[in-house]
Image (tube, rainbow, N blue to C red):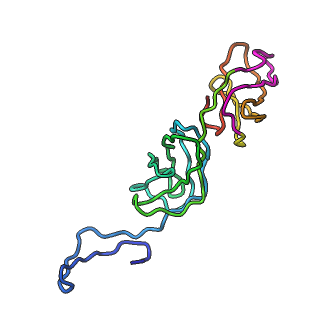
């Protein structure tokens, strides 16, 4: 039956007259709710660390689900979890849900978008001044306009990017010491390809 949050003693009976107290109480808890996902898009390969914000999270017994697929998670606080996106077979938007007991889930309107892994095929031009500011045109496949596009130069320098089409994007080079740097792109600010 419905009950306020907290522990209750459970008694069982086989005849409705004689009761035995169960040694471990049952704990009623608030149903967790989700208010945010960051990032809300990732590749079909999974493995993206998604920060889930909301209320009612507990350190033990939590479960994250992306659609019908369970996910590993790390408890951060009563208002934050980090859930790893599981793999997905085809592009789709799936509902993300959390539970404190792996059975009862709060209603969540938030969805995580699975996409094909983007792939770069060319970067033009191939060089520019060490002062930066060179606009690159990046060609490839499976580019999406996620609102969180970036280019990464080497392992540290990140620059905002502009989506042009599913096969083209632009970004400006940052200032750097002379040398060759690998270029990677991201559509969620976390996973770089």
Residue at 55% across, 41% down: 90
- Where does the image place residue 177, in percent across and percent down from the top left? 73, 16
Give the residue displayed 51% in from the left and 47% down from the top.
Answer: 82
Report the magenta residues as a range: 122-144
**Residue 81 position (above or below residue 21):** above
Question: For residue 181, what is the image quadrant?
Answer: top right
Q: Nearer the viewer, residue 77 or 114?
A: 114
| Residue lying at the far front of the rendered structure | 90
Q: Is residue 128 magenta?
A: yes
Outermost residue toward the bottom?
A: 17
Where in the figure is residue 11, as x and y percent of width and height? 25, 77
x%, y% of residue 132? 79, 22
Q: Residue at x 71, y 37 (%)?
A: 149
Left or right: residue 30 versus residue 42 is left
- The picture quadrant where one finds residue 134 is top right
Q: Residue 13 at what x, y percent from top left?
A: 20, 79
Q: Residue at x 55, y 54 (%)?
A: 95
The quadrant of the image that shows the N terminus is bottom left
35 to the left or right of 149: left
Q: Quadrant of residue 117?
A: top right
Left of 166 or right of it: where is 25? left
Q: Nearer the viewer, residue 13 or 61?
A: 13
- Quarter of the picture holding the C terminus: top right
Q: Is residue 26 magenta?
A: no
36 and 119: which is toward the camera: 119
Horizontal side of 120 relative to 79 (left or right) equals right
């Amino acid at each position: 039956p419905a009950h306020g949050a907290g522990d209750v003693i459970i008694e069982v009976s086989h005849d409705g007259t004689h009761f035995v107290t169960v040694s471990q109480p049952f704990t009623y808890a608030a149903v967790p709710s989700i208010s945010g996902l960051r990032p809300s898009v990732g590749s079909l390969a999974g493995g993206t660390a998604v920060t889930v914000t909301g209320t009612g999270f507990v350190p033990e017994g939590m479960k994250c689900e992306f659609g019908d697929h369970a996910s590993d998670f790390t408890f951060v606080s009563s208002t934050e979890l980090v859930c790893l996106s599981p793999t997905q077979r085809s592009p789709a938007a799936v509902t993300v849900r959390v539970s404190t007991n792996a059975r009862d889930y709060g209603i969540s309107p938030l969805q995580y978008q699975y996409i094909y892994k983007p792939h770069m095929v060319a970067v033009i031009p191939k060089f520019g001044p060490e002062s930066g500011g060179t606009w690159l045109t990046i060609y490839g496949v499976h580019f999406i306009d996620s609102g969180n596009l970036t280019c990464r130069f080497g392992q540290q320098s990140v620059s905002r990017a502009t989506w042009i089409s599913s096969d083209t994007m632009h970004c400006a080079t940052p200032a750097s010491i002379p040398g060759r740097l690998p270029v990677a792109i991201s559509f969620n600010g976390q996973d770089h390809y």
